[in-house]
Amino acid sequence: MAGTEGAPGGTRPSGVARYRTRGVPDLHHRFIRDARSHDWEPAEVVHRALRDRTDTAPPSELSWLIASGSTYAEQVGMDVAAGLLHACPEGDMKLVLATAVADEAKHSAVFHRYAHAVAGSVKDPGEAVDELSRDLWSLDDYTARFLAHTLAEGFAADEFRWFDEGLRGDGLGAVYRLVRRDESRHVALGMSYLTHGPGADRLRRLPAELLLAAEQVVLKHNDVDKLASLVHRLLPGTPAPDVAAWLRARHATRMRVLMNVRDDRQDLSRRRKSTREHMEV
């Protein structure tokens, strides 16, 4: 993609991707090892989650709707991660991204299975998830799309922290707990890549307009106030404004870490003024 050597657009880089070291870097190896040690079977997870649920009433329609939505959101994550793997110019990073693709496939499968188990079907995807996919793929730059994917995974991991607690009675919370562990690893992976080595070099060179566009895509599809209202519905004792403030603070922290690798971070902070007003970060 534009701004990334050997990976223009969504096409395959010319030739094979070379390894930067004799073997897989220690940090990358830890990501791979953690992914392998945290493997699980979707069918078994759903069976245990429904068997061990605490409520005696059938799972709610809301749980079915949330699981159905996650089925397709995780499919979008899988597609984008696969595109990043396909175009990645570094051989060692390809190995780590392969685990992320496998994780996202597993996530889509487990939510699909849960929805079928409790209602016999999965609700069709709405326009929002199709628009999310289009907007992510519209970022015609490898680094910009990698950045957007990392920020989106951050929102997902934070969102799932509340779903873990709020959906325990229906068994879906146990599913989100497992998925969140993977998503948190993906966030750590993305943050590490974009702040060290060749990933940081690419983030430094990324035109400011593309960096801001990547963040805007993620903010567009993560309505913090709407999510906070949903959390309050699941957990009535949790004030929605507190949840919204927490989500905004988490995103702000990730952005500060990422912008710290850039020489124009002060100018970027000023240019994000409208974003901060929208997100209150």
Image (cartoon, grey):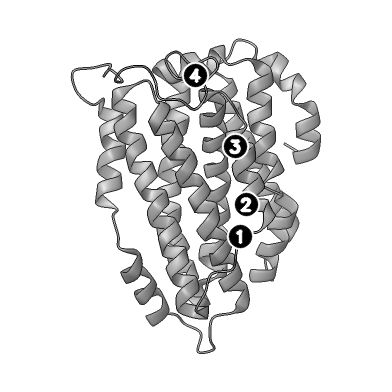
Residue position marked by numbered label 1 in the rendering:
125
- Secondary structure at badge 1 equals loop
Residue ranking furthest to the left: 22
Dot 3: element: helix
Alpha carbon of mark 2 to alpha carbon of mark 4: how far? 26 Å
- Residue 150 is left or right of residue 132, and the answer is left
Residue 8 is marked as: 4
Q: Which residue is mark 3?
A: 136
Q: Amino acid at mark 2?
A: Val
Count every numbered label the image shows and give the total.
4
Residue 203 can be seen, yes or no = yes
Three-letter code for the amino acid on which mark 4 is drawn: Pro
Label number found at residue 162:
none
Q: Residues within 10 Å of mark 3 (few under 14, many from 20)?
A: many
Q: What residue type is disc 3 on?
A: Leu
Contact (Cβ within 8 Å) of mark 1 with mark 4 = no
| Measured Cα–Cα span from mark 3 to mark 1 | 17 Å
Q: Which SS class for mark 4?
A: loop
Q: Nearer the viewer, residue 58 or 248?
A: 58
Residue 90 place in picture, x, y as percent: 34, 21
Task: Tell me where residue 23 appears, x and y as whole percent.
Answer: 19, 23
Which comes sooner in the sequence, label 3 or label 2?
Answer: 2
- Whole-Å distance between the Cαs marked 2 and 1? 6 Å
Q: Which residue is mark 2?
A: 129
Q: Is residue 227 left or right of residue 86?
A: right
Lower sequence index among marks 3 and 4? 4
Quarter assignment of residue 27: top left
Q: Picture coordinates of residue 170 (x, y %)?
A: 51, 77
Q: Are marks 2 and 1 in contact (CB under 8 Å)?
A: yes
Q: Are marks 2 and 4 in contact (CB under 8 Å)?
A: no
Give the residue at x 25% y 42%: 33
